[in-house]
Image: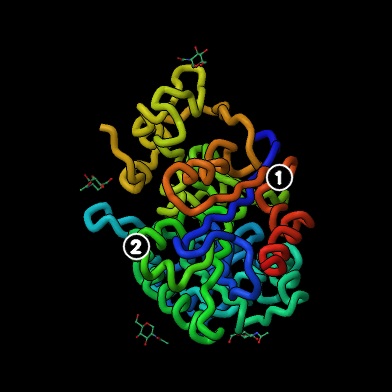
Amino acid sequence: MKITQTTFCCFLISSVVNTCYSAFHPFIFIPGDGGSQVEAKINKTNSVHYICAKTSTDYFNIWLNLELLVPVVIDCWIDNIKLRYDNVTRRTLNTDGVEIRIPGFGSTEPVEWLDPSRASSGAYFTDIVNALVKLGHVRNQTLKGAPFDFRKAPNENQDYFVKLKQLVEETYEANGKTSVILLAHSMGGPMSQYFLNLQKQSWKDKYIKCLVTLSGAWGGSVKAVKVYAIGDDLGSYMLNGKVMKLEQITNPSLAWLMPSRNYWKMDEVLVQTDTKNYTLDNIKDYFMDVEYPDGWDMVFYKPGAFYDNPTLINGDGDGTVNRRSLEGCKTWSSKQRQKVYDLALPKVDHMGILKDVNVLEYISNLVNSL
Ligand SMILES: *[C@@H]1O[C@H](CO)[C@@H](O)[C@H](O)[C@H]1NC(C)=O
Ligand SMILES: *[C@@H]1O[C@H](CO)[C@@H](O)[C@H](O)[C@H]1NC(C)=O
Ligand SMILES: *[C@@H]1O[C@H](CO)[C@@H](O)[C@H](O)[C@H]1NC(C)=O
Ligand SMILES: *[C@@H]1O[C@H](CO)[C@@H](O)[C@H](O)[C@H]1NC(C)=O
């Protein structure tokens, strides 16, 4: 994908205010896919390799722990973090003997750093949090984190939406009844939209000041299509996409991020091979041809031996999300009375937005200007 731009948006949610800009509203951070710490505890009867531990005395960090992502050890890692799809209940399960939890709900720590050792490669919301702290915000008081099990789509995160609602209410009360700003990145954008759609307008008027989204993946991304075929190396030369794929494709959140019919034409070519082109119209064939029929079951829209070296038809965007999907926030202007501000950030990529000086300044302005 050509990196041409990414998008910053600010949606007014409350219908009783007319500006996005206001002093000292608390923030709740809603991460994207892969954007929080994850812990596992294991007590397995089988392992995929003799070097893989079968038990752990307690929970340990499992997500983006680079020590677990080296050859062979990565096979143990995949077996511990992948999901198994039950096509009858349409829900996913962890590998037998594995418990997974997302630590620190409410605290900023697990969304500031993906790895508790604070390795710089795992820096996530930390620059934005630091910029807000400089303005007088306080971690865990006016700044809160709301991580979720990003492996799963909203249908399996219903308890998260309940917890998030409680966190919003608690944060409002603990800060002198001041409404909250939700700040989301990537898949956190559509997760926030899903959450807000569950609430009554009167609740939103009271508790939510606005929703700020960075690189929101409103309409999914062609990149999700790619992952089913060749995986994703997360931009790291140390990782092998084809190996990572074995875990990635088991995540229903990936299916949730497939290109949306609202943003792509049904006959638009997404993947081109020598003998067949894939579009939303025949995307079921694609899942069959990459030999992952569960992926088709997980994909929420229903329409009614894979080839080597497919070509992806991508167009421009931020390296992860296509431009038309990023610009999805523009479509809200005509759908809600409250104002939506959107800004294109030229040449900023999907992760770069989290440390971009202009973005830090926009967010600071949200706080400073009354
Ligand atoms: C581990 O699982 C076995 C059964 O498979 C059980 O007997 C044992 O108590 C478990 N150990 C812990 C620490 O939970
Ligand atoms: C579930 O998957 C299996 C194996 O792919 C398949 O044979 C079966 O028909 C599927 N069942 C449903 C209800 O989709
Ligand atoms: C925020 O809360 C978490 C969890 O309780 C804690 O680990 C962290 O140190 C706290 N951060 C600050 C700055 O108090
Ligand atoms: C796939 O689409 C491209 C461009 O849209 C076209 O040139 C090509 O002939 C198509 N290939 C097949 C096998 O239909």
Q: x, y percentage for residue 22?
A: 63, 68
Q: Nearer the viewer, residue 78 or 179?
A: 179
Where residue 60 appears, as percent x and y from the top left, is 56, 78
Location of the C terminus by quadrant is: bottom right
Q: x and y percent of residue 322 in the render?
A: 58, 38
Q: Amino acid at mark 2?
A: Leu
Query: Does residue 69 sit above or below 303 in this rendering?
Result: below
Name the kind of residue labelled 1 in the image.
Answer: Leu
- Specify whether residue 50 is in view: yes
Which of the 4 quarters of the picture holds residue 117? bottom right
Instruction: Provide the secondary structure element on which disc 2 rests.
Output: loop
Mark 1: secondary structure: strand
Q: Residue at image x 36%, y 35%?
A: 288
Q: Quadrant of residue 194?
A: bottom left
User: x, y (%) of residue 86?
Assistant: 28, 56
The residue under label 1 is 345
**Cα distance in 3D space between marks 2 and 1:** 30 Å
Q: Quadrant of the N terminus?
A: top right
- Near-viewer residue (66 or 261): 261
Q: Is residue 126 left or right of residue 215?
A: right
Residue at 53% x, 52% y is 339
Q: Establish whether ligand 3 lies closer than 8 Å to the Cβ of label 1.
A: no
Evaluate whether residue 219 shows in this view. no
Q: Which residue is mark 2?
A: 198
Q: Height in image: 349 above or below 102?
A: above
Is 185 or 42 nearer to us in this picture?
185
- Bin the neighbour count of mark 2 within 10 Å (Cα to Cα): few under 14, some 14-19, many 20 and up: few
* Residue at the spot 54% in from the left edge and 78% down from the top edge: 178
